Amino acid sequence: MNPAEIAASPLASPAAEITVWGMFWGAHIVVKTVMIGLLLASVWCWAIIIDKVLLLRRTRRAMDRFDEAFWSGNSLDDLYSKASERPTTGLSSLFVAAMREWKRSIQNPHASFMGLQTRIDKVLDVSIGREVEKLEANLLVLATVASASPFVGLFGTVWGIMTAFRSIAASKNTSLAVVAPGIAEALFATAIGLFAAIPALIAYNKLQSDVAKSQGRMETFADEFSAILSRQIDQSAGRGDRAA
């Protein structure tokens, strides 16, 4: 829509300012594109937020169940046989990975216990990295939208204000009825940018904090389980020395 059409459009009346649809349909094509893009980004962010909230809740519950089973006094072999039969996540994933490395070493009669503790620690670190990567997937999208949306909305605002001033020059009319609709449409783009950015920023900080808590919990479990296996390694090595 060119400036002359904007000036002559019925949307130039003050009544158009009170309707959201009126401001959207009366906006320049560039401003419309900015608005649609920001709305799509907001929908994408909300989909990520809901998915991550559900994922973190499932992970936290799975950690609680496994933590209870791990410290219940059952043997590690029984717990390993049960955990390895179904998909693992969180603490159970760390446990299965470390136990698998442990069993591969002790079942080999020619294997040496030298370096086993280091290998187990490496396996635990890799497993933690994989679990954290799953939890952090797509969080960068929230950070990007939170930081970029206000500037994208500001671009739409600047373009809308430029169009409004061009409509004033084309109509040679400086009344508020001419300039107000264009400025309202321009500011509406900034409002949509903030609408997309604020929830994304709040959710990113909250989800990142929850991921950090889960990571800390996994690291604590890894240290505790590594100490348990270290004692098992020392006992097995001692029995081997006595047998020799």
Image (cartoon, rainbow, N blue to C red):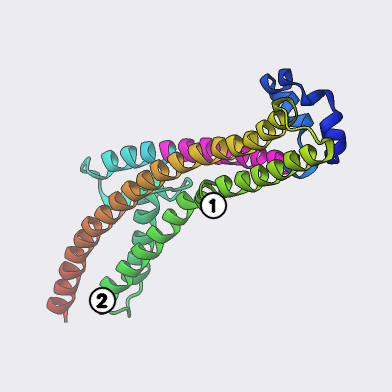
Element type at mark 2? loop
Report the magenta stretch's main SS. Answer: helix
The residue at 62%/43% (across/down) is: 153
Question: From what the image shows, is residue 38 above or below residue 133?
Answer: above
Q: Is residue 144 left or right of residue 9?
A: left
Residue 188 placement (x, y as % from top left) = 64, 33
Tell me which corner region of the image, top left, top right, bottom left or bottom right, holds residue 99: bottom left
Q: Determine whether 119 is above or below 60 in the image.
A: below
Which residue is labeled 1 in the image?
A: 144
Where is residue 52 drawn, in percent x and y? Answer: 49, 41
Residue at x 54% of width, y 52% of height = 144
Say if residue 103 shows up in the picture: no
Q: Nearer the viewer, residue 6 or 47?
A: 6
Residue 2, given in percent of the width and then of the height, sits at 85, 41
Q: Indicate the amino acid at tag 1.
A: Thr
Q: Which amino acid, mark 2?
A: Phe
* Disc with the residue nearer the chain's start (2 vs 1): 2
Q: CA distance from mark 2 to mark 1?
A: 47 Å
Q: Residues within 10 Å of mark 1 (few under 14, many from 20)?
A: some
Instruction: Tell me, for residue 113, which label it has, or none.
Output: 2
Whether residue 95 is situated above or below residue 181 in the rendered picture? below
Residues shaded magenta: 32-57
Give the x, y percent position of residue 63: 34, 42
Q: Quadrant of residue 115?
A: bottom left
Left or right side of 150 for 135? left
